[in-house]
Each structure stands twice: as structure tokens, then as C-alpha cells.
Image (cartoon, rainbow, N blue to C red):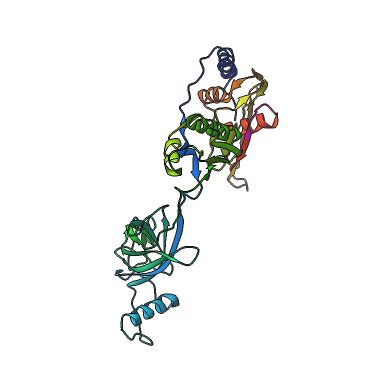
Amino acid sequence: MGFASRAARSALLAVCSVAAMTAPIAAPVAYAGTRIKDITDFEGVRENQLVGYGLVVGLAGTGDSLRNSAFTRQSLEAMLERLGVAAAGANLNTRNVAAVMVTANLPPFASQGSRIDVTVSALGDARSLAGGQLLVTPLMGADQQVYAVAQGPLAIGGFAASGQSGSSVTRGVPTAGRIASGALVEREIHFDIAAQQELRLALRNPDFTTAQRVAAAINHLVGANAARATNPGSVVLSRPSDYAGDMVSLIGQIENLEVEVDTPARIVIDESSGIVVMGENVKVSTVAIAQGNLTISIQEDPFVSQPAPLSRGETAVVPSTRVNVDEEPGGLVVVPGGVPLRQLVNGLNALGVTPRDMISILQALKAAGAIQAEIEVM
């Protein structure tokens, strides 16, 4: 990795120097506010996970092998018994049935009779669920209570095809699918939010400054000390005694308030894919950067060695190797303090530095203490 030449290093110095000279007189950047509803979660207003076990029928010979999937056979026999068909001990050898797990998320305040989407995933050795129909499947919560019932045809995004010679082609995941509006809500989760006197707002990205700004925005609207930041991740909202409405109307007024979200200076690096993500607040202190370019070239020029006439020698290929080492003279480039990191990165990009080289430079700057930011390596 390296800068191409002295001209390249001079260009980087010029970019960083111009950024340093223009930073004090640049106009402040106007940040758009973010709604409170987009950065916080209200206590008690959340989804609940549901799970169930069922059978998918109607598969074109791509279902479970009953000899290898004992649970599929037992489930099929139990279902037929409930329908009045004596299947116990029968020689069942169909591959049109597959045992599946059904999952769904129950939205907050979902009323009885509303519909939700479900995801269906194969349990056994089924090759594909394409064309299958999910039979009635109860969906239970963590308390083992049934909250919804799922049924319907599956929509599969992938496919699989195979021939008699053994060749096969698979695209996507043919053993998992979805049923849009495939579950009917049977039980509601009761939560009387209107009667609450106090509610907690949980910040999705905890930060002291953001929490204080959220509380200040709420108090400015309500006109009382209705909100207080108890920690960087929580803001407690109390309904004022002289407030005419209930907690629902109070939330409706404050959730669209806009606040400026503050983020810590952080750089996230994914070395496996060469991705670098950095925050706006990352700054670079005064530092000198040197980077050399070492090139090693190896050239093979074999030649044929021919013996003299009437001699006992043999014709042979003799290897010939030439190794050249070319190293450009290195130099230090001084980056003035206070330059935003984005200016440094723009200069490196203009010089054609690869993402992996940029990752090494950022890590070296962090080791030298020249970056006031936290570096997180994924």
C-alpha cells in the first residue's frame, strides 16, 4: 500500500491544509431534527413473538420422508385420527407432507380478529415447500397461551430442480416461505396505556445528550417538568396533574417533536469486506503520516543448454531468475490538527487508496492517538 509519488503526498497535504484553513470560517451545518417516535420506544408498546408447530400438505413429492422423520409420521397419524381416519399402524409412504415451524410477531394493541403475517420453515428433510398449504396451526406465546391461528398457502421465494443423473439447481431457500395475513389473532394482550400516570421512553441508541434534549423538548411543549432523563437510555414521562387529556393524547403530542440526535465519535471497520463507516464527529489531531511503496518483481527467463557435438552431455532447460526491488523514497506528510476525518478520507480516495489500505491507515492513526474516536472492528 502506498502513495503513488511525491506529487500524491503533496496533493493530500493540500487537501488537509485547505480543510484546516476553511474549518474556522465555514458556515455551520444545519442538521434536520429527528422525531421522538423514531429514536425511542415507549414502555409496554412492543411486539410479542409467537411460535407454533404444524403440517404443510399438497407438496409434489418434495416433502419429508416418513421413514426418516418420525415426528412428521406421528403428526400425520395424530391429525388423521382427529379427523376420524384410523391411520395408526398403516404403511404411510407419502412425500407430500412436511413438518414445519411457524413463527410470527404479534403487534402491540392487535385486536381480536385482525390478521398478521407468518413465516413457515421446514423441520425435516423436505426438499421444497413450493405449492404447499399450511393446515390450522395454533401460535403460542412465551406463556404457552394461544394468541393466533395460522393457515393458508405458502409463498416461496426460492426453487430447486434436479434430474435423474443427480445434477441439481437451487436458487434461494425453497424450504422456507411466508403467508401474508396468514394468521388470525384470537387473543388480545391487554395494556391500559391511557390510564397510566407515568411512562418510560427507552432510547434505541443511549446517549446522555440525546436523552437530555428529548426531556427538554417535552417540557417545552407541555409547559411543566413532565419529563426527566434518568440515565442515557431512559426518559421518564409523567402526566401533569393539570393536563386535560390522558396518556394516549400526551404521547400523540410529543412523539412528533423533533430533536437533534447526538452521536459519539466512532469508526466501524469490517476487515473481511473492507467496509469503513465513520461518524460526523470524528476529528484528527496534528500528525505526520509516512507511507512507502515497495515493489518486488520476479522474472523467469529459462534457456536451453545444448551440449557440444559428439559429447556425452544432454540437452537441458536451465532456469534463469531476475529479481528487482524498487522502493520509492518515503516522506512524512503533516496533517494539521482539527481536520475532520472526512477530509482526510476524501484526500485518500482521490489518490486511489484502497479500502484495506485505508483501514490500516486509520488503525495506525488510532494507535498513535491522533484520532479522537472509538474504533470498532467487526
Residue 275: percent from left, percent from top:
53, 37
Q: How many marks?
A: 0
Residue 367: percent from left, percent from top:
69, 32
Considering depth in this image, is 270 or 216 the residue closer to the camera? Answer: 216
Magenta stretch prevailing secondary structure: loop
- Can residue 302 be seen by looking at this rendering? no
Q: Quadrant of the C terminus?
A: top right
Considering depth in this image, is 302 or 329 the residue closer to the camera? Answer: 329
Identified at 35% across, 64% down, the residue is 150
- 159 lies left or right of 244: left
Residue 229: percent from left, percent from top:
59, 37
From this view, report whether residue 8 is shown above or below residue 234.
above
When asked about the image quadrant of residue 117, the answer is bottom left
**Is 372 inside the magenta-drawn segment?**
yes
- 119 lies left or right of 224: left
The residue range painted magenta reads 370-374
Which residue is at the far front? 242
Identified at 48% across, 22% down, the residue is 30
Considering depth in this image, is 51 or 2 the residue closer to the camera? Answer: 51
**Is 8 inside the magenta-drawn segment?**
no
- Can residue 88 be seen by looking at this rendering? yes
Residue 261: percent from left, percent from top:
52, 32
Q: Quadrant of the N terminus?
A: top right
